[in-house]
Amino acid sequence: MIRYFCAMKFLTHKNRIRATLLFAVCIFTFFVNNSTIYPDIMECRNIVTAREMVYSGHWLVPTMNGDLRLEKPPLPTWLTAFAEVLSPDNLALQRAFAGIAASLLILFFFLLGRDITHSYDFAWISSLILCTSYNIVLMGRTASWDIYCHAFMLGAIYFIFSTFTKPRNSWPNALLAGVFLALSFMSKGPVSFYGLLLPFIIAMLVYKRPLQPHRSLQLIAMIMLFLAIGSLWYVYIYAFHPDISRFVLGKESSAWLNHNVRPWYYYWSFFLETGVWALLTITALAVTYWKKRITLKREYLFVFLWLAVQIVLLSCFPEKKKRYLLPTLIPCAYLIGFIFTYWHSEISSRADRLLFRTNACLIGVVCLLIPVAGWWFVFLPGYITLESFIIIGSIIGVIACYIFLAAYRKHAFHFVYCIVALFLFAEAAIMPFVGDVANNRDFHSISATRSMPKLRGVPFFYVNGQQLRIEIVYEAHRCIRPINLTNTDSVMRVLPAVILTHGDAAKDIPTQLRSKVNISPIGHFDNNMRSKGSWQYRPEFIYDASLLTRK
């Protein structure tokens, strides 16, 4: 990787500035104010597992709340655990590792776009578009698995492409491709192979035809290296826990076929995952229009086929979730990049002027509506002072004016720069207020029990048969095991202990047990991370903690 950074000295002055600016955009996009929003369920699962790696030593056989956690490969959790070792309970650092993965994705995206088109303009503008795509921003600020597997896979795709299309360095590229394939497999199994690599290979075979018999040895070495590295953990788990491995494999296979089953057309709105670029994504899909105008017609059709195959393959899978659309943002950004590169060189026809100005002006109008929404949902509820609201609203208004100016003057790249400026400003200045709005103002975490001396070393339990959200385990910073309160002997053996109940503990404790224990209320905890009134505010996050001791 070092040689790609060292290669900057061979760039023109203009492209060195662009590389520096792209690095700065990644810093703002993935790292600035990245801890303002409370973690979601996927992050909590990953972080709880990482903590148990560090404090219980379960590095090779991960556990989550004391139970084996083999559903996900451990590489992202290892990285999160490393963050825990460096700085315990530092959510910003844990998410920063995801930000590093997202930055790697942007780097490989830039390099791949450059090599596909031999155009730095295209790679530059497409990278800015990807940096401001909704789901990329979200996943790059989330300490879960998805961004890792796709970032490593895009690195593998770049090195595979280089292996079969460049006359030099085929062996180093092939070996690096094998390593990155293994890293992706160790991040989320075959997910990115199916959603990102396979569609790319199909599109490349159709449009690039990189079949070179003299590179067969490199291909074999790539596959062998991938298998050697990528299978190590799986072989270890199967060797020492064969029964559980088979159970997890069957469970995951069943989930793919029977869990979250949606109709085949569920992904029809995939373009919405790009966020601000949704309308332009639809515009870029007008193949019959653009293939007559874009100079890089073959490259455009190659990327279009890559995206089309992705959507078809993902739609064929019974289990469907919106986050599975993350890899589709990569070809989407390229397609929009083709359009903007074309518009940058010429917007001569009436149809092009109409398309560009319509897209730009609609986004400009949405930009102007942001302060209006902020007035109702941020200022009036008291999340922000009037002075701060005026300053933020004025800056957003200025950016909107520049968007309209770019639309009027037909400056395609300037329009993209305005969108990037809006995102950077939002991430630097608006994100803290977004956190105040999204997060529960009455949040009273069960983590407060950590500072109570009388609970040090005391085990925590919840009522067997009730659901325990992993977010509670995350907040409590300890395992919380189920316990059968009707079995008096088993309860007496673990006393003193803390019992978590929804409401007064006496209601859940049988009469026979109540006669033998003292019930001391510890506190009422509202662990809802989202604000009241939100659909995510749920009663299962509200617990009463009670200390049970022998009479």
Image: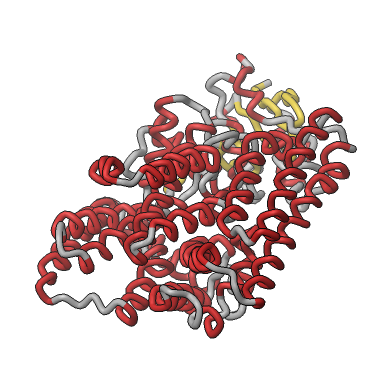
- Number of numbered discs: 0
When asked about the image quadrant of residue 63, the answer is: top left
Q: Residue at x 72, y 40 (%)?
A: 434
Q: Residue at 27% of width from left, 65% of height from top?
A: 161
Nearest to the observer: residue 509 or residue 254: 254
Q: Is residue 217 left or right of residue 465?
A: left
Q: Is residue 145 left or right of residue 228?
A: right
The quadrant of the image that shows the C terminus is: top right
User: For residue 192, which quarter of the picture?
Assistant: bottom left
Q: Position of residue 412 (x, y in %)?
A: 58, 60
Q: Is residue 358 left or right of residue 174?
A: right
- Is residue 352 visible in the rendered image? The answer is yes
How far from the left and from the top, in percent, is residue 117?
A: 36, 66
**Farthest-out residue, top:** 453
**Residue lying farthest to the bottom in this orientation:** 288
Give the residue displayed 47% in from the left and 75% down from the top.
294
* Residue at the image position 43 percent from the left and 57 percent from the top: 121
